[in-house]
């Protein structure tokens, strides 16, 4: 039976089936594959420059770019992680020995509040010190049980991390070396006009570069500034809080304030007025302006998306995909806008 339409439909079904099966195979390492693609896009300009300098020796240029990526990205990240683990262990030891007592801090805050505020808290069940300390104790027990449960799988998680990291580096090498050829083959296979394909691929790479570079610069700047201010004010665990502010700053507008805001309130209600005022002024005028000025310049300007679209897509992406979502969300939003522009 020679039916071209039937052959075409059968082949299309087969193509979709094997594509889904291949995606299913890659699913356990989707994070490694995703960041391999992202880093290949970010470091492609370095690779092209090295390729010219090394007289078109692709393997050597890709290897040199890979080493450069390790030096720029992973070596500083390893140092920060080591410092964070050391700082975290010190904070845990202070909590265990009672030097850090969050129940006592909560009691100080309640005692310093005006009576009408305490009355309002009582209505919501938040002013009862005994009840709140019991809740905090229960929460601490639950967290300890959770950590004890997770400790059993640390070895497996470490092995998975090492394997995923190796897959990412291995894939990154070949994406750097053969990325232009793979991109050309993908463009050729997509059944769209040349102009539409050029616009979509340009939007895809532009958004990835702008989102990663912009968010990382903003996060690192806010975390460093917040950590330095905490160290200046004598707050224990400045590195830990700085890293948390850097992580939360991936959420535009409100991220870092979730850390320094409660600390500033604690200073104010416990009588440390100058520390509280200093932290609020610094948080609003310095840390906040970093987000308000740098993020639109580094992210919104290059992606050509409104700030509210960047905000919503970033939060939604992180809610669905975790940390990877701060890139995936804006990319999907940008492609959504680009496709509708092409359709219009």
Image: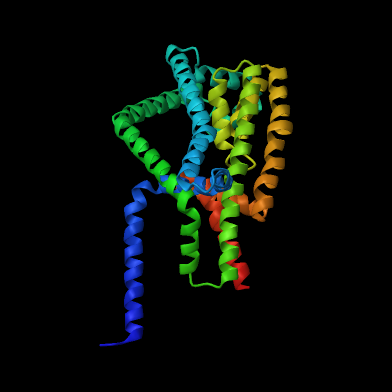
**Labels in figure, total:** 0
Q: Position of residue 224 (x, y in %)?
A: 62, 28
Let me know if residue 31 appears in the view: no
Whether residue 10 is situated above or below residue 115 in the rendered picture: below
The front one of 283 and 56 is: 56
Q: Which residue is farthest front? A: 55
Whether residue 13 is situated above or below residue 41 in the rendered picture: below
Q: Residue at x 32, y 54 (%)?
A: 25
Q: Position of residue 112 (x, y in %)?
A: 63, 19
Q: Position of residue 73 (x, y in %)?
A: 52, 35
Q: Quadrant of the C terminus?
A: bottom right
Q: Which residue is farthest left? A: 1
Let me know if residue 141 appears in the view: yes
- The answer to whether 19 appears left or right of 77 in the picture is left
The image's colour scheme reads rainbow
Q: Residue at x 67, y 56 (%)?
A: 304
Whether residue 252 is situated above or below residue 96 in the rendered picture: below
- The answer to whether 16 appears left or right of 322 in the picture is left
The front one of 252 and 83 is: 83
Q: Position of residue 34 (x, y in %)?
A: 45, 49
- The answer to whether 114 appears left or right of 31 in the picture is right
Q: Quadrant of the N terminus?
A: bottom left
């Amino acid at each position: 039976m020679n039916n071209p339409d039937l052959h075409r439909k059968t082949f299309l079904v087969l193509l979709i089936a094997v594509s889904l099966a291949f995606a299913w195979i890659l699913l356990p390492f989707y994070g490694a594959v995703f960041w391999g693609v992202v880093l290949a896009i970010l470091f492609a300009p370095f690779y092209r420059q090295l390729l010219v300098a090394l007289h078109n020796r692709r393997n050597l240029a890709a290897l040199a770019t890979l080493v450069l990526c390790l030096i720029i990205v992973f070596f500083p990240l390893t140092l920060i992680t080591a410092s964070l683990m050391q700082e975290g262990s010190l904070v845990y030891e202070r909590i265990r020995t009672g030097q850090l007592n969050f129940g006592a801090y909560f009691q100080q805050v309640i005692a310093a509040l005006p009576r009408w505020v305490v009355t309002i808290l009582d209505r919501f069940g938040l002013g009862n010190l005994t009840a709140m300390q019991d809740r905090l104790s229960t929460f601490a027990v639950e967290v300890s049980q959770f950590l004890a449960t997770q400790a059993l799988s640390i070895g497996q998680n470490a092995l998975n991390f090492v394997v995923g990291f190796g897959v990412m580096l291995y894939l990154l090498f070949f994406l750097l070396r053969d990325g232009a050829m793979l991109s050309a083959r993908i463009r050729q296979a997509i059944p769209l006009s040349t102009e539409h394909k050029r616009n979509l691929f340009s939007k895809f790479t532009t958004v990835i570069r702008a989102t990663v570079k912009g968010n990382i610069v903003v996060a690192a700047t806010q975390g460093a500034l917040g950590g330095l201010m905490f160290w200046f004010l004598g707050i224990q665990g400045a590195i830990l809080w700085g890293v948390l502010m850097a992580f939360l700053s991936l959420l535009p507008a409100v991220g870092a304030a979730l850390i320094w805001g409660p600390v500033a309130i604690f200073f104010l209600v416990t009588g440390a007025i100058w520390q509280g005022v200093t932290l609020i002024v610094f948080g609003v005028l310095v840390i906040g302006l970093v987000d308000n000025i740098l993020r639109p310049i580094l992210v919104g300007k290059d992606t050509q998306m409104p700030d509210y679209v960047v905000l919503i897509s970033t939060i939604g992406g992180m809610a669905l995909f975790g940390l990877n979502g701060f890139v995936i969300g804006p990319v999907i939003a940008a492609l959504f806008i680009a496709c509708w522009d092409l359709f219009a």
